[in-house]
Structures are given as structure tokens and as C-alpha cells.
Amino acid sequence: MTTEAVVKSRPVVSAGSITKGRRRPTDVLAYIGIYASAAFSVLLLVGIIGYVLVKGYSMISWSFLTGVTSVLNDTVGIAGNILNTLYIIVLTMLIATPIGIGAAVYLNEYAKPGKLVTAIEFATQILSGIPSIIFGLFGMIFFGQTLHLSYCILTGALTLVLMVLPLVIRNTQEALKTVPDSYRQGAIGLGTGKWYMIRTILLPSAMPGIITGVILAIGRIVGESAALLFTAGSDGMLPITVKQFLDKIFASGGTLTIQLYLSMSKGQYDVAFGIAVILLVIVLLINMLTKLLARRFDVHTRE
């Protein structure tokens, strides 16, 4: 029998017939469950955003964004809370970012695998799972009372540093692990020093993941309230002079989430939903910024 005859005698199997013939009822149920879960997640997100927008959109105005709450003047504003939020974000990330990236570089590039590295990684995992209110209690006792900082923005920022450090460290570690070992071997083979190789090759290659971790940490700071209730206070006044602005770091300051909580506790639901709208916009901008910066600093997609 010739080769041509053998080929002609073989049955022709159409593409997809194997999978179609083996599709079982459990597979169909699994597909239905997957698509139903995805649809439910999307609908839940759209429902929450829509409900908050409907309830809080009427409160959004220029005076609401640029004024402060005053009983005497009968005004409602969140400008002071926005400033306090930005203040805490900047202070926290100025401290947490270099420490977190430095710790991740040490653990991934310098430290030899062993009990010490395992203990440090285990400690970061434990820190990331501790409830935020416990961080607030510790911050109030240690930073507020032991170090005599009392209720102030600095106390809140130092407490948040402890909360976001595990997030920055773990994201930086995972970003560094994605860099191929051939980059390291090639750089060392060319005679470069280890720090020069880390600074010029590894960190730029891992930058998208590092930026993602930093911005996720900012997102956690924006949404935090429990820890700041015990440490930063709730004052929402705007500084008038430059000296007051500089001294604000040692003064009480309530963030947007603190003001939202206080408004809800006082029954001011329209104000609370107005603040919720601002927080949703901030979260949306943070996610957009994450994608933009990750794409901008991705060395693999640069032209």
C-alpha cells in the first residue's frame, strides 16, 4: 500500500470536534458558573459606584472642594481634609519607599538564603495580615505617648509606614524576581560592580512592578481610617500662613476617610456620600496612573 493510499484512508477529524464530543454537563455548569461570577462582579462594582454617585453627586461643588466646615459660617467643605490626606501620603511614602525598595533589594540580591531571610519574609507576611486598628493602637502608644508626638499627622504617617512597608517590599521582590538571570550574568561578565548592575539594569527592568507596589500602597493610605483615628486626629482646618502649613506636620489632621466616618456618625449622610464620590475618583485616578506609569517605565515596550 502506498503512502498516498494510507493518507487517504485516514478519517478526517474537523477542528474542535474532539472538544465538542467530550463536553460534559459538569463542563457546561463550570462555564455557566465562571461567566455568572464575572457578571456578578461587574454588576456589583457598577451598582456600588452608581449608588454612591447618585447619593453624593449633588454635594460636589467648588465651595465643597475648596472650603472648610464651619458652624458659624454655615459652610461645609473638605479642603482641609484633602490637604491632610496629601500630607500623610507624601510623608508616608517618603519614608516607606526607600526603606521598602532597599529591603527588597537586600533580600533578593545580597542576602544568602537561610533562616534570617526566611524570618524576615515571614515577618513581612505577618505584618501585612495584622488588622489596621492594631497598628493604630501601637502607633498611639509608641509614637504618640512614648515619643511624645501626641495626635498629629506625623504620628499617623509613621504608623502607616509600618502598614505599607510589607506591600512595597513584597511587590519590589516579585518585580526583581521577574528580571532574567541572564541580565545579571551578562552584567557581571562585562566587569560591572554589583551595585552598578542593580542600579542601571535590575531596578529599571523591575520599575513597572515597583511603581505598581508604590501606587497600591498610596491607595491603601487613601482608604485607611481605623489606624488614623488613633494617631492623626480629626481636625480639618486649613493652614493660613506658610508657618502654619509647615507646622501642620505636628498638628492634628483628619483625612477624607476620617471625615467620612465622622459625617456618618453625625447623620450627615449627604456629606458622607459626597466625600465617597471624591474617594472613588481618587481610586480611579490611582488605577489609571498605575497603568500609565507601568507602561511608561516598561523597558521591554520602549521604542
Image: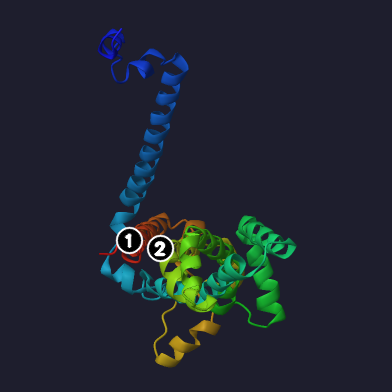
Considering only vertical position in the picture, is 255 above or below 9?
below
CA gap between label 2 and label 1 equals 7 Å
Q: Count neighbours of disc 2 (C-alpha within 10 A) and say few if under 14, some if 14 to 19, many if 20 or more.
A: many
- Residue positioned 42% across, 15% down in the render: 22
**Element marked by disc 2:** helix
Do the CB atoms of the residues marked 2 and 1 lie less than 8 Å apart? Answer: yes
Amino acid under label 1?
Arg
Q: Quadrant of residue 61?
A: bottom left
Residue 90 rendering spot, x and y as whole percentages = 46, 76
- Residue positioned 34% across, 74% down in the render: 67
Whether residue 76 is visible, yes or no, is yes
Q: Quadrant of residue 209?
A: bottom left
Q: Quadrant of residue 12?
A: top left
Amino acid under label 2?
Pro
Residue ID for mark 1: 295
Quarter of the figure with the C terminus: bottom left
Foreground pick, 152 / 104? 104
Earlier in the chain: of badge 2 and badge 1, it is 2
Residue 122 rendering spot, x and y as whole percentages = 68, 58
Residue ID for mark 2: 208
